[in-house]
Image (cartoon, rainbow, N blue to C red):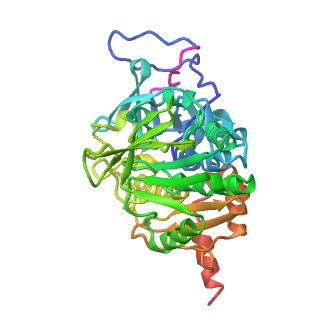
Amino acid sequence: MSAVGAVFSCSCLRSGVWLLKPGMQKMSSLHTAARCAARDYYEVLVLGGGAGGIAMSARMKRRVGAENVAVVEPSKTHYYQPLWTLVGGGAKQLAASARPMGSVMPSGVEWIRSQVTALDPDKNYVWLENDIRVSYKYLIIALGISLHYEKIKGLPEGFNHPKIGSNYSAQTVEKTWRALQDFKEGNAIFTFPNTPVKCAGAPQKIMYLADAYLRKTGKRSKANFMFNTSLGVIFAVQKYADALLEIIKDRNITVNYKRNLIEVRADKQEAVFENLDKPGETEVYQYEMLHVTPPMGPPAVLINSPVSDASGWVDVDKETLQHKKYPNVFGIGDCTNLPTSKTAAAVAAQSGILDKTISLVMKNKLPVKKYDGYTSCPLVTAYNKVILAEFDYNGQPLETFPIDQSKERRTMYHMKADMMPLLYWNALLKGYWGGPAPVRKLMHLSLK
């Protein structure tokens, strides 16, 4: 998951060494967006203050000491983004998903409030805004994934109109709830783009919540629900796909496969889709409510970077998370090319593996712990029910509990809505939660 946020001083006025490009010896003022690094070298440099970046900085603090770790992150606020499904459905408040970045940054770790502009792994340094250079011994890249609403004609300016929202941004998630409340009669359309996305289940979670809300308010009979997805399947794992298709059938939802949103005419409440099976063919739909899942891609700084593959994702070994070319560079989370679903649960599992990988590399030993691709998607299907999908690299279920997790359960909803946020803030971000593997092992041993 990527993240975002900050409210902590990075001690730019403290004395320290500044290594700038020739002719760039001016220090930025306190009120500029970019903040300087207090030093020009750190043993461990973490790029990104999202779930992966904060979790790994906490773990590295325990490995090498807080004074030897720095996190580069320009944002003032850190968001627990998995909560936004419930925010868009009116079940939670946006404020509950947000905390000042300074409050989640591990104490003593240097917070560099700046943005990475270039990486030079051959020389072991990165460039920040204002041409500031910071060197490292070990680099952890946790820059998340970038949203590209602008790749849809008519967006993001279309969000200034009613009837349209998106649960993928703090600026648009509350618009989803308003559009749902304002629904009168017509098409309710939910989209899935023709790109990699984070939390691939989220585009349909809000659809199920919207269905439940309109049933509760007596408007469902006036609504025509459509899920227009660029994919050819409803979900990548067959066990959960079968369960979702039953729900879709029972709730009278139409699924249009291989349809990709390319334009929003918000003033006319029209959405234009391309038919991926018939290039050049488009379809125009009138909507009363539109939920947009934006196209996504790697952060701009990673495109054509030495650390990235041809598509712009950090090129890491899928078992150790160590870079394939640079042994002192590592990646975690949404910015990597790991062939698994990009979720916070995946980041948790990856953080435990990566911690062990780095600890061995620091001792000049080869990594031995292997990441199996574990990821999880709590598929919210109502205001009190969840299907807890858990699976591995091979798309095989990797379930924690000794029950059939493809069934809708109230207990799993409470885990999603109430327990997981606590686990996120108090365990994952503090470097103590490495995913449910120990719990799964204990659960299944207890049955033997």
Magenta residues (range):
31-40
**Closer to us: 173 or 8:** 173
User: Horizontal and vertical percent for residue 124?
Assistant: 34, 36
Residue at image location 59% in from the left, 73% down from the top: 400
Question: Does the rendering let one see residue 221?
Answer: yes
Q: Is residue 117 left or right of residue 227?
A: left
Magenta segment includes 33 = yes
Residue at image location 68% in from the left, 53% down from the top: 214
Q: Is residue 246 left or right of residue 308?
A: right
User: Horizontal and vertical percent for residue 85?
Assistant: 62, 49
The image shows residue 165, relative to residue 243, as above or below, that is above
Magenta segment includes 289 = no
Instruction: Quarter of the image for the C terminus: give it.
Output: bottom right
The image shows residue 275, relative to residue 39, as above or below, that is below
User: Horizontal and vertical percent for residue 34?
Assistant: 50, 21
The number of numbered discs placed on residues in the rendered structure image is 0
Residue at image location 61% in from the left, 84% down from the top: 445
Question: Does the rendering let one see residue 353?
Answer: no
**Closer to us: 416 or 369:** 416
User: Horizontal and vertical percent for residue 354?
Assistant: 47, 56
Magenta highlight: main SS? loop
Quarter-of-image position of residue 408: bottom right
